[in-house]
Image (cartoon, rainbow, N blue to C red):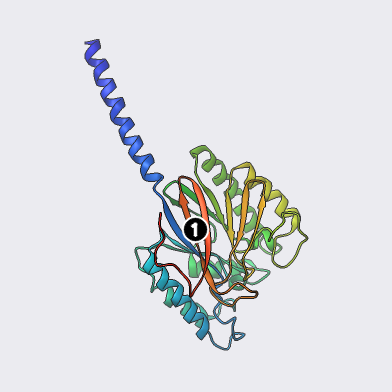
Amino acid sequence: MNIVHSTKSLVIAFALMIISFGATAQQQKPFFFIQMTDTQFGFFTDNKEFKKETENFEKAIAAANKLRPAFVIVTGDLINLPGDVAQLKEYKRIVKMLDPSIPIYHLAGNHDVTNDPKTTDIKAHRKQFGRDYYTIKQNGMHGIVLNSLYFKSPAFVEQEAKAQDKWLRKVLKKDKRSGANPLLVFQHHGWFLTDPAEKDAYFNIPLDTRTKYLKLFNEYGVSHVFAGHYHRNSFGKSGTMEMVTTGPVGKPLGEDPSGIRIVTVKEGKVSHQYYSLDAIPQDIPL
């Protein structure tokens, strides 16, 4: 009787091991996603029209349809004039051109909710796009999507900023326990451009706030932060964490052309490359 019971236990244990191995293999399956940012309808012509933004975003979405990423994420400044009905309508029209089987995520930028947002601005953005901070999970990767206005300009949205902070710390603890690999953060403003200790400026987050959160991210093993806002590409490191600032789908402000970033995740490792809209590859080998 004991032998039979022992044999059954071994069979069950072996079956569970097979199931567990299959689930782990599925989790670790390589994939890629596309980061777009600063489509910013109206910026080329100071809100007179948005023909060039339409051309660029349609080109980016067409590339996504051809490449078939796991998902697309647009890291803020979807439009140029906060609340503009025509700009929002055109952005959403083009979003609908993406194959519905490919998820697309949207973030709040300063041109979506103003440089110094109030609660009414946040509510208006949520009405259009849903929650302004949330998580993404894909094949073992955990992505944390944040509203960087709560770090950059929290004066009139202190309660929302506190709520996001509380939520963020809870998610980080949970992700560390679960062994999320890799752990990525997405936001509009970059914490810094090249140096974690650089002086406060328009294109980064204030040093006091920056220092606190960079320490938190390193403590919990965030490997990359992907941001926009700068309308150019820029890179830096804080400890083992890479700060990746991506150039725009819309109007460039430097030498980098309008483009997209393709991010590959393979065996827990992250690699990424920025491509001009006119030089996007035909396929992404995994």
* Number of numbered labels in the structure image: 1
Rendering coords of residue 261 (x, y %): 52, 64
Q: Does 120 appear above or below 148?
A: below
Describe residue 101's horizontal placement relative to residue 86 as left or right.
left
Quarter of the picture containing the C terminus is bottom left
Residue at the (52%, 83%) spot, across then down: 52
Rendering coords of residue 56 (x, y %): 49, 78
Residue at the (76%, 58%) spot, across then down: 198
- Residue in the foreground of this view, choosing between 173 and 186: 186
Label 1: which residue?
Answer: 263
Tag 1: Cα neighbours inside 10 Å, few (<14), some, or many (≥20)? some
Rendering coords of residue 275 (x, y %): 51, 68
Describe residue 285's horizontal placement relative to residue 167 as left or right.
left
Quarter of the picture containing the N terminus is top left
Q: Residue furthest bottom?
A: 48
Residue 92 seen: no
Q: Amino acid at mark 1?
A: Val
